[in-house]
Image: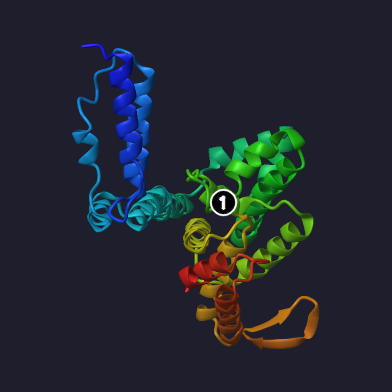
Amino acid sequence: MFYTEQVRRNQIDDVLNISTPTACQDAETVAAATASSATVSKGRGVHRIKSTVQLRKLSVPANTLLARRAFNQPNHNLKRFQSQSNSLLGPSLFCISVCTGSVMLASVIQYERLRDSVKQINAFEFYKNSIYRKNENVISKLKNNFNKLEPSEKVFGTILLLNAIVFLAWQVPRWQHIMIKYFMTDALARKIPVSSLLLSAFSHSSPIHFCFNMYALHTFCRGVIQPWGDMGPEEFSAMYISGCVVSSLASIIFRRSFKFQGNSLGASGAILSVVGYFSLSNPDQKLGIIFLPNIQFDAIHALFGIISLDIMGLIMKWQMFDHAAHLGGTLFGM
């Protein structure tokens, strides 16, 4: 059925009269009536409103509308909590997988190393090695020199090399977008690359940050790895890698909870896991500060001081350092 011009005008007048807000009407009633009037006035053949009774049914008490809206409106806090939980699910599973996998891989490698160490070199292998030793190339010489190093020096040299490669990659302008995405952790990102939990712990963009962390790592490596420590190189590597992802996850959880802006990178969290383990294993060992050589204190006191400083940083919301990553790494090492 097509409306005539007079009927259409009458219905529009009725709509406009009804859309006047009263004490019992809500703002949504006015909007619905106005939208309906626009629909009637534009389309000639539109037969959506048969009478003004349908529009009068929209006029309901305000308390009823509020109650209905409260019932139908989703809980935004619950949805936000669910979205945060879903966004943290991937990093959490990645952290658990890396920790478990690194421990299992370290056990296998350590078993193979111990089994190979009991094998005796026969006379033929010794003769063959003595002949080919004269024709060694540069790579073979580097490999032999690396094998002569102590276990702690081997582990530290490997970690130092990886960090140096990443540091040099930061200096290439065309790679900046890749480095920012995968070699830094952004807690407020909608989708966090799980690999950044591990890669960011091998990432340093400034030379001071890089040199200070590598010096601290070298200091504690010898005290943890055999023969001076009680850890094998495989066990230390598993603990260090696990400390990387655990400290990164702690940083992401804290920053996301308090909406802290900024990215995080560096090996400090993993190094502090080594410091935590060393301090509990050698509580009476004397430690000092690089710039204050005359000041020494027990390792256990230094550990409590580091923990107290990080807790204070979290409470005061200091953002110069990633105190959440530091505290997470320290507690993991303990």
Considering the numbered disc 1 on the image, is that residue within a helix, a strand or a loop?
strand
Q: What residue sits 71% from the left and 48% below the top?
A: 164
Applied colour scheme: rainbow
Residue type at mark 1: give it. Thr
82 relative to 132, above or below = below
Q: Which residue matches tag 1?
A: 185
Question: Mark 1 packing: few (<14 Cα in 10 Å), some, or many (20+)?
Answer: many
Q: Position of residue 49 (x, y in %)?
A: 24, 26
Residue 13 vertical placement versus 41 (above, below): below
In depth, the one of 229 and 14 nearer the eye is 14
Return the residue nearer the eye: 177 or 43.
43
Percent from the top left, x then y, of residue 150? Answer: 63, 60
Residue 199 picture location, percent across and down: 57, 48
Q: Quadrant of the N terminus?
A: top left
| Residue 211 vertical position relative to residue 279 in the rendered view, above or below | above
Q: Residue at x 77, y 75 (%)?
A: 290
Please determine whether, in this image, residue 172 is positioned above or below residue 112: above
